[in-house]
Amino acid sequence: MTRRICCIAVTGIAFATALSLHAQLPQIPGFGGKSNSASGLGDTQIASGLKEALSVGTEKAVKLVARPGGYLENNEIKILLPQNLRPIEKVLRGAGQGPRSMALSPA
């Protein structure tokens, strides 16, 4: 379960990073109407740099959430149980099904 949560968090962080990078592409020399030859970088070099940046960002994100409490105690990245499922969680806990409710929400 923890591994699944980490994978979801890392995917979300990588997706957010890619969106942020996409928004900044016009500001990078060689993008946004200028040719790559003006920046002195070829497409292969640019692609390699982007892959390296995503790799480093993903590695840092995994280290951040993989430590004990790194995901569940970080309110900035923790995904809460949807509001419409919270009553079900309370019913399960009240019926002595705490372990099953933990599958919904660890808190």
Image (tube, helix red, strand yellow):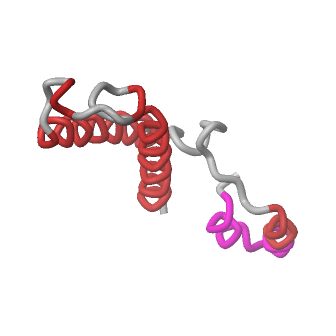
Horizontal relation, residue 35 to residue 15: left or right: left
Q: Is residue 64 magenta?
A: no
Horizontal relation, residue 70 to residue 37: left or right: right
Q: Which is nearer the eye, 98 or 88?
A: 88
Which residue is located at x 35 percent, y 33 percent?
Answer: 60
Question: From the viewer's perspective, is residue 15 above or below residue 59?
Answer: below
Image coordinates for residue 75, horizontal then vertical, percent: 66, 38
Q: Quadrant of residue 74?
A: top right
Horizontal relation, residue 2 to residue 72: left or right: left
Which residue is located at x 70 percent, y 53 percent?
Answer: 80
Image coordinates for residue 104, horizontal then vertical, percent: 67, 66
Image coordinates for residue 92, horizontal then vertical, percent: 79, 73
Q: Which is nearer the eye, 85 or 93?
A: 85
Q: Which is nearer the eye, 53 or 82?
A: 53
Q: Which residues are magenta?
A: 91-105
Q: Which is nearer the eye, 23 or 26?
A: 26
Which residue is located at x 62 percent, y 68 percent?
Answer: 103
Q: Is residue 93 magenta?
A: yes
